[in-house]
Every structure is written in structure tokens, then in C-alpha cells.
Amino acid sequence: MTSVMSAGRDVELLRTLIERVDQHDPGAFNNLGVLYHSRGLHAEAVDAFLRALAIDPRMRTAARNLEIAAATPGACDARMAALDARVAADPDDRAAALERARLSRLIGRNDTAIRQLETLIAEDPDDAAALFERGLIEQRAGDLRRAQRWFERAVNLSDTDTDARLHLAEVLYQRGQNEQALECLDLLLARHADSADAHLLRGFVLGDMGRHDAAIASARIAAQLNPTLSTAQIDLSLESGGLAGTPIAIDPSTASGMMSVEPEGALARYGLGLAFRQRGYFEEARREFERSLAGGEDARMAEHALGELDLIAGRFDDARARYESLLALQEQPRWWNEHGVAMHQSGDVEGAADSYRRALRIDPRHALAYNNLGVALDDLGDHSAARESFVRASELDPTLIVARLNLSRWLAAQRDPLAALTLLRELVAFHPRDAESWKGMGTVLQALDRIEEARDAFLTAIECRPSHAEARFGLARVLERLGDSDGAARETQQALRYSPIRRESRLSVAIDLQRECPDAVGALELLAVQGGSPLRGIVLPTDDLAALLPEQAPAATVASDTAQSGLDAGARAVAMAVADAARTCDDADAFASRAVHGEALERYTRARVLVDMASVAEMEPTAQLVWQRATLGEARSLCLLGRGVEALPQLKRAGALWPHHPEVLALFAFAAASDAARDPASAELARTAMLRLLRQDVTSAALLHFAGDAAMKMHDEALALGFYRRALAHDPARPTARVAIARMLRERGDLLAARLELVAALSAVPNWRDAVLELARVHRDARRHADARWILVDVLKRWPTDVEALQLLIEVLVGEERAGDARIVVDRVLRHDPDNTGARWFDGVLLAQQSRTRDALARWARLAQCTEVDGFVERARHAVSHAVYGSGAPSDPARVA
């Protein structure tokens, strides 16, 4: 009983300490939090650590203690519940939502914090505080490149934000960009000369640049502004092995296992390792990370850093073991992606593909994992799925060079050099110093026999990277064709200095570290021979083997000639026609992938005619498959061109052969729905096909979305919603289905649900145009005109001639009663599109608001004579037909000039 009373008195004494603690001393609040935690006052400990971090957000000891304390059941429940209640009571309370996300970050719930912050950013892309918090998460995770991008956005939006600029300078310093870091700090100190942290960091930067006298001067200024920087402080730290409620000694020399004494800067070894790694000193970085482990620093961060170094060094088995131990503790998309790279490099392509898919299940927006999955799928022979993965990676992150390079290489390998060239030209326009892109362009131009252009591309690649052996090999071959034998020999000699063997470009995987320090890391070589280990994951076809072994070639040739002689002329003609049709389908696929459906239709039709015989059922299996491919491609193109009715005859023939084929059912449903207005029986046929498709286990999100569009053509929203939801279940990152659902909800008037769907779509693919415009429509319908206006202005910054966005902006400005601004936008739209019905309608509205009724009715009368079916045309007809005599304008449209 006495011990209980003593413990109660201790708790009361501890609670009174808060009034005596120096309110500007973060170390005091940190140590007080450790004492609270030792007495079982976990909620009070969390409050104390949060107070410490509010005073000094960079205090890593308090941050780590907060994570440990918050892991105790109930420690943060009350605080988090209060914030949840504030957000639930007022969904527009951004301050509460931001505070909740910040708390989630501080207590180590990074996945939750990321989701909350990205929702805030999707709603307001100019929220500098949310952008800064997002950058802090990436900086803590060690992804310095992404952290820099978030901090730069925050600084650009809020130039007075001291913390964002200071963290940006710190990241620049850690990435080895000392000149930029110094410039950033000088701008900060020009406005806030009393920032001790800025002066201290400036001293580190100057020291790293060799300017030691200036570095010492900056450190002295920092110490004068904050004397605690030059004194040794004892900050208590919680250890995860302790038991809650265990008494501890305040004297550090008698501290139990629950408490240790360590100076601020607990990740010093890890940070030094990052600095070495950034500059390409990988062995030095490895030693520092190993010392970080031995010194008790964050084991997961150090193990992950060592795993990345193992990947770079080719120690695939070591890397795989490290990632498996990390993933046993916590599953992270970055770790699964890099685990897949380790397996991919060692030859286990199927295992690698599974790891990439696991990364995408956790984070469907992980562009690198999509890129790497595309490489694995191409290695496994699934070329069409590989292309889709590269396209998705490029859509999710347009700055991901490796995905666009892989897509261009894939197109070149699939005999579409023109498409590859178009993609490479776009790539070098945005990244003019990327040597690999210029080298790829040279290779494609050479294949197109555009020799002089190829020479210029190879020369640019060498200018960007003089050690690029493959570019020099390519230049030598081009010079030889141009008759410059001396130049070709010179370039070959130079190339051999950098690489003794010739390697053609192939699809490549990547890890985040390559983006953080691209100059230091370079490319990862897949399936390379390391340490004498055998080459795994490669299958040599018989033809390739015969080419490698010339002594076998005569026998192989004789056998081939003998087999060929057994074919009659008719069979040879059929085989040639089928092969030609297959090549034509390849060309059509390339056009269809770029949405050039007219060109694709022409080629699919040509391919079908080549193999179109009296009875499809009597064809050889190969010819039958080519006919199916051509017919479905032709039908798909017709549907997308709005001519679905023309596809019905061929689809009926295909349906007779393959009655359960999912794509046949989906295309037939769409084509029949297109014919429903003319023939009511077609509507029932379309519904039957869709119900049969719904009963199948279809896994293609694109096909399910297509079926949903067919249901919408029949105005069956319930059926369409079912297809869209199934598409999302198979591909949560696909934004098109969410936008379609949001459009349905908006038209029903359920604006909140529509907004949530759009926020989810934009979190998967930020700034996706269709989702952004639909979100603007939701705000317009909810009469939140200011929100809609900000969204549309941001869209028009990226696409100034987007007529649809301009038309929406007119509606919003009219709703805000900003007639002058609306007039400017109306005139702009009519300059771009004189026949735009929306702009013509609002032209009349603005005139009517100026009491120029006769002019308004004249505009509407001309608009009412349009033949196209449009909501604005119907409004104009209604306005003209209801005009009242005596209002200054005739009500008869025929009398209006």
C-alpha cells in the first residue's frame, strides 16, 4: 500500500514539473517525456515529446522517443480521436487534417500520413504546409531526390517558409549539391539572419567546399545565436527493450536497459554513409552503414542502405537475404521492388515479377515497380503486357526516364521505329543531356537509314557522356557507312578503351537510388555473369544456337530445305499470307496503342482479308488465331471510332466460334448497344452478352471498363457500376474507372461521393486531366466556384489551349458574377474554336447581363440553328422560343438577323 501511495505522489510530482520546465528548451521536454514514460504516463510522455519537437523539429532523439512511446497501446488514441472528430465535424477544416497527418508522421505511421497528405494535396495542390510535411516523410525514409522535389514545391509556393528552405538546403547538401545549398542558405539568411540552424548548416556546407575559414565563422555565429549548439547536452533516449512502468534512475551512470544516454545526432554514421554514397564512394559508405548498425542506430535504415549497395556491387544473394529479413519485419513497396531486382539480376525472372507485383499491391502508384515488371514480363515473353507496364510507369511518373527509354526500345524491337523515334524526340526535349536517350535515337535513326541524323545523335550522346562506349560503337558504324574509315577506326579504338565487348541496348530495371544519385550509380546490368556463376534465366532458340555453331548450319539447312520441299505451293501461299497478316497486325497494334484508330482499322481489315477464308472453323490453328486477332482489332477500332454497328457481322462470326471469349462478348455488347436506337432487339442482345461477361472471371481492367462503357450506352447505370467496380478491384491505380463512377455520382447529385472517387483517382495519378476537370465540375455543381476556379487555372497553366477547361472556367466565372473575367475567356475560346457551343451560349448570357437583350437573342438564335445535339443548343432554343414581345427583341427566331 505504501508503494502505491509513493508511486501516486511521484506521478503528481512529475505532472507539476511541466510548469517548471524551460518552455524554450526542447531537451528538457524530451527528458521529461522519458520520465513520464517510465512511470506509465504514456499520453503525457507523447505530449512532452511533441512539445520538444514543436520547439526543435530537427531533434531526432525526441522524434525516436515519440515513435517508441506512441507504440504503447492507448498513448495517442485520445489525441488522434480528437483530431478525427474535428475532421469528421468539418471536412473542410484543413488545419485539423494537416495536424492529424503531421501526428501520423511523427509517431511513425508513414503510410497513413502519406494517404492523408496526398488527399490534402489533391484538394489544394498549393498547400505549402502539406507539401513540406510530405517532403519530411521522404527525407526520413532516405529518398533525398523525392524529398528535394517536395521541398522545392513548398518553397516556391511559400517563399517565407523558413523550415522548408532550411530542409531544402539540408537535402541539397546531403546530395552533394553544395553550390545550390549555399545559394539556398544565403537567400534564407538574407531574410532571417538570426537563424542559428541556417548558420550552422552553412558552416558544414562551406567546410565541405574547402572554405574552412568561412565555415568556422558561420559556426561561431550559430553558437552566438544559440549557445546550446556549442555545449554538450544529455538527451535521454527510450530503448524498445524496456518494460512500460519500470522504474529508472535519472543518473545516466545507473540507467537501466530502458534508458540510455546519447548525444543528439543519433543517425550520424548513417548520414555520413549517405554523403559518401551520394558521391560514389560506395566502400566508404558501406563501412559507415556497418558502423551505424554496430553503434545501435536505426537497423532497418542501415540494412536497407546496405542492400542497395549489394545490388550495385552485384552481390545478389546478399541483397536478397537482406531484403527478405527487412520484409519479414515490415512490407514496403520500395523494399519489394528492390527484392525483385535482386531476384531478377540472379536470373529468377518469375520470382522477380511476383516481387514487383507485391510492391504494386501495397502502392499502386509505384512507377519504378511498373517499369521493372514490364522488363520481367518481356523476359517471360508476354510482350503486350510489358508494353502496358511501361506505358503505366510513364503515366504515373513522366520524369521516369528509364520507363520511356524501355518503351522506345520495346517499340524498336517490335518493328515500329517511327513510334520509337517520336518517343525519343519527346524524351530529349525534356532531358537534353541524357546520353542514353540520344544513343537510342541514333540507333533508331540508323535502322531507318537516316545516317546523317544518326551521326548527329551519336555525337550528342558522346558530348553528354564521353565514356559512352555503345554510342562510340554506333558512331563508328555510321562513319563507316558515310565513307569515313579513319573516323570509324578512331571511334572503335576509343570505344574499346571504355568497354572491351560490344553490348546492344536492352530493357533495364532500376531502383530509387539511381534517381537519387544518378551520376554515381549508373545502370544495373541484368542477368550478368558475376564471380564465375553460371548465366541463368536465358533460353537460346534452335535458330540462334545454329548461328552460334556454324558447323551445324549445313545440316540444319538441309533439314529445312527437305521439310520445305514437302509443302505444296498452296500450303506455302497460305503460310505466307498468314505471316503477312501477323506482321500487319503488329503494325496495327502500334497505331492502336497511340490511339490512331483510323490507321489501325485499315491495317486490321487488311490482315483479316488476307486470312479470311470460306470457313474460319476449317483454318489451321495459327491462321485461326491471326484471324481472331485481326477481327477483334478491327471491331475494337470501329467501336472506338463510333462505328460499332459495322462490326456486328464479323463479331457474330467470332461469337459462333468462341462464344465465351471475354473480348468477343464485350465488343459485341458495345456494337449491339450502338445499334439499340435503330433496332430495340439489339439492346436485349447487348444486355445478354454483358450479363454473360459479368459471370466470367475476367481479370483485364481495360476490358471491364470497356464493358462498363457499353452499359452506359444502354443507360444501365447499375450494370455499368458493376463493371467499373470490378475494373478497380483488378487495377486500383486505374483512374479512368473512378472518373466514370464519379461522373455517374455527380449526375445523380451525390457530390460528396463523387469528390471522394476523384480524390482517389488523383492520388493514383496526380494531375490526370480527366479527373481534374471532373473535380472542377463537382465543385461547380456544389457552387464552390472558387475551388473550381483554382483547379481550372492550374490546368490552364499546363495546357493553355484546353478548350474544355476554358469552357468550364467560363461557367465558374459567370457563377461567381465575374463578368469581366468571363468575357476575356469567352473571347479566347471563340478565337480558338468559333463554333464552340458553350462559349456562344455564354456570349449571349454576358450580353443579357449588360441589358443587351436584342444582341443576346441574336447570338442564341444563330446557336439554335445548329444541327448537333448539345445541351447549350437546347438552352438557346428554349431561350429564343420563350422570348417575350416588347422586351426589345423579337421572339421569332426567323426575324432575328
Image (tube, grey):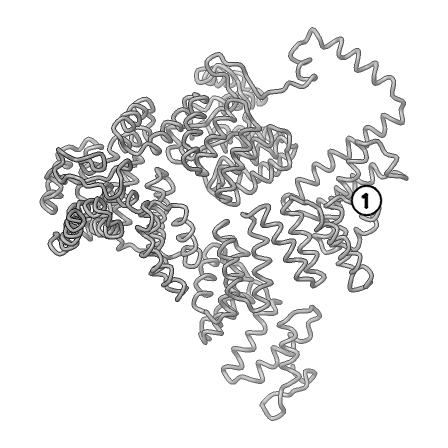
Indicate the position of residue 527 as horizontal and vertical percent values.
52, 22
| Residue 830 vertical placement versus 154 (above, below) | below
Which quadrant of the figure has residue 391? Answer: top right
Q: Considering depth in this image, is 597 or 854 the residue closer to the camera?
A: 597
| Residue furthest to the front | 1
Q: Position of residue 8 (x, y in %)?
A: 17, 52
Q: Which of the image's four quarters has the C terminus?
A: bottom right
Q: Position of residue 549 (x, y in %)?
A: 66, 9
> In the image, 118: left or right of 585?
left
Q: Residue at x 21, y 37 (%)?
A: 259
For this orientation, the residue located farthest to the bottom is 886
- The residue wearing badge 1 is 654
Q: Residue at x 29, y 37 (%)?
A: 240
Vertical relation: 824 (above or below) 324: below
Image point (63%, 92%), residue name: 885
* Residue type at the position of mark 1: Ala
Q: Left or right of 733: which side holds 669?
A: right
Question: For the residue labelled by badge 1, is the local secondary structure a helix, a strand or a loop?
Answer: helix
- Residue 116 visible, this angle: yes
Q: Residue furthest top?
A: 551
Crowd class of label 1 (few under 14; some 14 to 19; many from 20; radius 10 Å): many
Answer yes or no: is residue 262 visible.
no
Closer-to-camera residue (523/247): 247
- Lateral position of residue 122 relative to residue 676, left or right: left
